[in-house]
Amino acid sequence: MGDFVRVETSSGVATIRVDRPKMNALNPQVLAELTEAANAVGADPEVRAAVIWGGPRIFAAGADIGGFTGLAPAEAQALSRQFNDAFLAVENMPQITVAAVNGYALGGGMELAMAAEFRVAAGDAVFGQPEIKLGIIPGGGGTQRLPRLVGITRAKEIIYTGRNVYPDEALAIGLVSAVHPAEETYDAAVEMAAGYAAGPAALRMAKQAVMDGLPLSLADAVARETEHFGECFATDDASVGVASFLEKGPGKATFTGR
């Protein structure tokens, strides 16, 4: 896929691997490759779930700060747009997405992890938005996604102080879904993703309904839900699921994702 981002797929689960030694710092090339990878995986009908992973030692230590030297405001805004384009590409993938976080996920690294729907953390994971310590603010969606995940007051405190968030706290505040020993984290994320990959096509519609409704009024959001509810009945999985329920009871259908 690229020099620093590659994609591997097995049994309907894609792994988007960021691999830029030493710290997976996110520079413009990594962001461009990440955008390309997310778009390619998103368009692949054989992929039903995806894992975002930075490898066994580190998820991503953030932006390449060396590139910040001497930036004019307009240049900084252009860089911010690159970050947001990449992370929105991840967020907008139709498949279910899981970030497997080993080691540091700081700044842009934490923003990338938050662009996934679920986060599985290693016991050695370290989250944080330390930008304030550089005299700047998060520029890759951190000020927007973090409040949506953990609440406004807690997000403000994490952003305003720039402090680290460790796995136990991350689990307690809902930033991550599970914590595993470091050597088991990637496999746990793949297992979670594989569970969703075996689900019905309706999972994609459920994801789209949630994402569509977030910026809307409740009335407009439930109208959007109604649209997606109807679309489910055009799928093979809905026919299989209803028939299986009536014949065998709940939870026994085998879905194809179509």
Image (cartoon, rainbow, N blue to C red):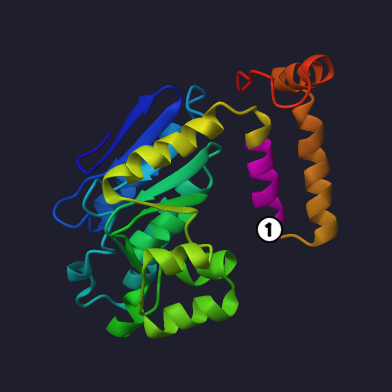
Q: Residue at x 39, y 63 (%)?
A: 167
Name the residue rendered at 41%, 41% in the picture.
Answer: 189
Q: Where, quadrant-wise, is the N terminus in this rendering?
A: top left
Q: Magenta segment: does it hold 213?
A: yes
**x and y, in percent, of residue 218 in the image:** 81, 60
Residue nearest the viewer, comparing 137 with 252: 252
Return the x and y of residue 80 as percentages of the image width and height. Answer: 39, 65
Residue 116 visible in the picture: no
Kindly indicate the quadrant of the structure image that contains residue 28.
bottom left
In the displayed structure, 123 sits above or below 51; it is below
Q: Is residue 5 above or below residue 104?
A: above
Which region of the structure is painted magenta? 204-215
Give the x, y percent position of residue 193.
48, 36
Left or right: residue 23 compared with residue 201: left
Does dot 1 land on a helix, a strand or a loop? loop
Residue 133 in the image: x percent, y percent?
A: 30, 83
Evaluate whether residue 26 shows in this view: yes
Dominant SS in magenta: helix
Amino acid type, residue under disc 1 in the picture: Leu
The crowd level at tag 1 (other Cα within 10 Å; few <14, some 14-19, many 20+) is few
Q: Quadrant of the C terminus?
A: top right
Residue 75 colored in magenta in the image: no
